[in-house]
Amino acid sequence: MAKKVVVTGFNMLTALGLDWEETWKNIQEGKSGVKTISLFDASENQTQIAAELPREFAEKSASVIKKRISKQMTRVTQMSYVCAIEAIEKHNIDFDNINKKRVGVILGVVNTGDSSTEQGTSSKNLILKRMNNAMSAWIGMRYNIEGPNFTTSSACSSSAFAIALGYDAIKAGRADMMIVGGADSIINKEEIEGFNEIYALSVANDKPEKASCPFSKNRDGFIIGEGAGIMILESEESAKARGAKIYAELSDYAFTNESYNIMAPKPDGEGMADTMQQAIVNAGISKDEVSYINAHGTSTMLNDLYETQAIKKVFGEQSYKIPVSSTKSMTGHTIGAAGAIESILSVLAIKDSVIPPTMNLDEADPELDLDYVPNEARKQDLKVVLSNSFAFGGHNATLVFRKYYG
């Protein structure tokens, strides 16, 4: 019998909360984490809003990380470190009773966040702050984990890739447990200016909580968010041996590369459709089993249109029966952390039989006619959930999560 890979833990830090419980509660209630930027003076930027972590993160981080170590970390690295520690401790993982050589860490990282908003960088710590592999290394050192430990980068799909690579390590028998996910923050003057130059960001500064509106007629770009997501993957045998709670199964995934344009996706969602189709085949499921799709759903004109077209290409008439939603409408687009955060939300949707809403969908785009779960969470039993991540450069990933039946 093929080895199953299961989810036995998770945590996340988002603009909606500094743990998974608070974030999930606010997601179900349809709250927005988007506010006027406070991390720097954005008054001269076209976009002046973002989904920042609550201010209490600094205090939380200081309570978890020793002062000497924290000075060697950027704020983003601290996010990943704090998130991982709480994921491990919340789920009672005792590494003294686990073979640490068969536990690894893989994080999706775009950069470590040593930007103009970062405080305290000097020649004494610059190298350590800018090493993106430090983000996974610190977690490994915290628990003396000796298995595979590295970072991977594929823009907005980075942490989805990290989750899939963790799956591969367990499936191949190279590890029993993998700590996977990612963290990111690009809320700084220069990167917001850069995204404004390519017309990617919303400029609806007067109504921050309404600015991220995926699939709506009035969408004008994405909202930058920041945060971290950590998932614990484990072989079914390992999880059962230590009596762990199993939240869901990661059935399989697909990676594709569009090889089309450094920024724009293939027209008509061709590459996105290919990714979802391959993921379904790899997972050995039927299309009829798919209960919900957590969309990439950025609130940009092309992504939302092409992702909708891709879903129709894959599912045909059935696409009108599959709920699709974008949690970026509440968390903002957390870039390198997005795949992990949205994967955790997909697992929680399965766990609690709740489909998160797409908020701010007040006026539908007539070209977009699927069931986007507008403005209100929905109770529904979910068997199989797809989590989509589609990135600049054409780096696509679809993860397939399934209800665990034992």
Image (spheres, rainbow, N blue to C red):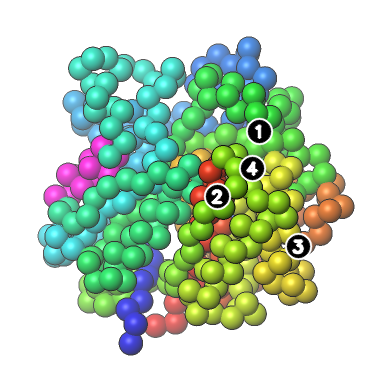
Percent from the top left, x then y, of residue 21?
Answer: 47, 52
Q: Residues within 10 Å of mark 4 (few under 14, many from 20)?
A: some
Which one is closest to the eye, mark 3 or mark 1? 1
The three-letter amino acid code for the residue at tag 4 is Ala
Query: Residue drawn at (27%, 47%), measured in percent from left and top?
Result: 150
Q: Give the label on residue 371, or none.
A: 3
Depicted 273 relative to depicted 396: above or below: below
Q: Earlier in the sequence, mark 1 or mark 2?
A: 1
Q: Is residue 115 left or right of residue 349?
A: left
Q: Which residues are magenta?
A: 134-144
Mark closer to the observer (2, 4): 2
Tell me, yes or no, whether the two marked residues, 4 and 1, touch with CB atoms within 8 Å: no
Q: Which mark is residue 200?
A: 1
Which residue type does callout 3 highlight? Asp
Does the image show residue 86?
no
Q: Amino acid at mark 2?
A: Ser
- Which residue is depicted at the point 83% across and 49% down? 365
